[in-house]
Amino acid sequence: MKKKIVLAYSGGLDTTVIIPWLKENQDCEIIAVCADLGQAADWKAITKRALATGASACHVADVKKEYVEEYIWPALKAGAVYEDKYLLGTATARPLIAKVLVDYARREKASAIAHGATGKGNDQIRFDLGIMALAPDLEIIAPWRIWKIKSREEAIRYLKRRNIAAPVNRKNAYSTDDNLWHISHEGLELEDPANEPQCRKMLAMTVTPEKAPNKAEYVEIEFEKGIPVALNGKKMEGAALIAALNKIGGANGIGIADIVENRVVGMKSRGVYETPGGTILYYAHQELEHLCLDRQAYSFKQQVSLKMSELIYGGFWFTPLRKALCAFTDSIQEDVNGKVKVKLYKGSISAAGCASPNSLYNTSLASFTTGDLYSHADSKGFVKLYGLPVLVRSLMEQEKKSGRSKPAAKPKTAAKGKPVKK
């Protein structure tokens, strides 16, 4: 019986090469599996390509709803942003793809899962850790770690020698990844951080700020327990809401990030990310949190946000710590309810109003007009106690400057050298 291998298939250059390579190097049957995460893809054409290059079957799993509700929303509620810029568009998708691959491997009684992640990137870690967590008995095959192909150019030549059309344009060969949440671009001029990105040639979902309208656009988003549920007064499912915000944000030049990031494997990489809808949601969600969370909760959540971003980026989705951090964020998001209005203008976002039934903003306390809840006189004692360490240090420094400081007295001792009991 031939060995069965489930392949994470996108129809791109790498996975197009992997099918014939696996068949040439292993006596195996290839089952291609695609995860529909809302990316711009012609699934009929991709399925046809997989079968034409040697796969015995090609399955397309529509997991957009699961991706939004079980992966994007937890990252949003946690405020997870990697290295201040990256909204984790690829990193949140990989554990779900790993789960889909394992499901099909079980269904097809396959003994191995293959993927097209390179030995330099983060995705190999995310795929491997996801598969290891869900199916430790399955073999993991990553051709980029074992074959002799060293570049995209060599991969193209490999296909050409076998009369297989390469799904790539040599003149515009950015390495891209897209889904409902984002599009990433790497390669070409981006490989030198000194080069300005050729955004007009590159961007697919977003216009440059210079090309955005000269008039601001206002957007209102309603949240329930930290989850966006309505856009401009219209209730919407998550995937539809993100798609609508992508169009609005993209038209206004929102969410373009040029990033030099630290990969898990130790090297730095440079890419340009488009996340128009996600950028708006992160901004609006944070504005609502400022209104609804107290100081201690918000401060601790900032630490959770950082750790969550590191876990997601590093492939540790299926871990007890990630689940525990999500339990914390779910708890404090109970009160993050309300509506946020933001203004979009030529690549920028600014707040335009926020209201919540759980708002901790109290006009009587915050107003310059003294109310019943607060007396200015009460603050004197508080400020003195609050600043006591500052006062004590200042007095000590004054004494040292004036030369009046005295050494601490030694404790009195008994005849045998023991301290005198008081």
Image (tube, helix red, strand yellow):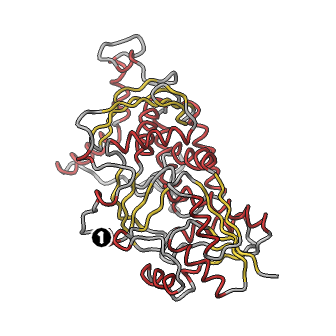
Residue at the outermost top position:
372
Q: Circle 1 — which element?
A: helix
At a point 25% along the width and 46% down the height, the residue shown is 211
Amino acid identity at mark 1: Glu
| Figure check: 258 above or below 268 | above
Q: Is residue 99 visible?
A: yes
- With 327 as the anchor, is 154 left or right in this view? left
| Figure check: 162 above or below 209 | below
Which corner quadrant of the image does residue 171 belong to?
bottom left
Q: Residues within 10 Å of mark 1 (few under 14, many from 20)?
A: few
At a point 42% along the width and 14% down the height, the residue shown is 373
Report the label total: 1
Residue at the outermost left position:
402
- With 36 as the anchor, is 388 left or right in this view? left
Q: Is residue 325 visible?
A: no
Task: Report x, y in % for residue 307.
Answer: 51, 55
Task: Report x, y in % for residue 341.
Answer: 39, 29
At a point 54% along the width and 85% down the height, the residue shown is 162
Task: Report x, y in % for residue 134.
Answer: 72, 63
Which corner quadrant of the image does residue 17 belong to?
bottom right
The quadrant the N terminus occupies is bottom right
Residue under label 1, please give it: 189
129 vs 177, nearest the viewer:
177
At a point 68% along the width and 69% down the height, the residue shown is 132
| Figure check: 388 above or below 78 | above
Task: Report x, y in % for residue 186.
Answer: 39, 67
98 vs 81, nearest the viewer:
98
- With 410 as the anchor, is 39 left or right in this view? right
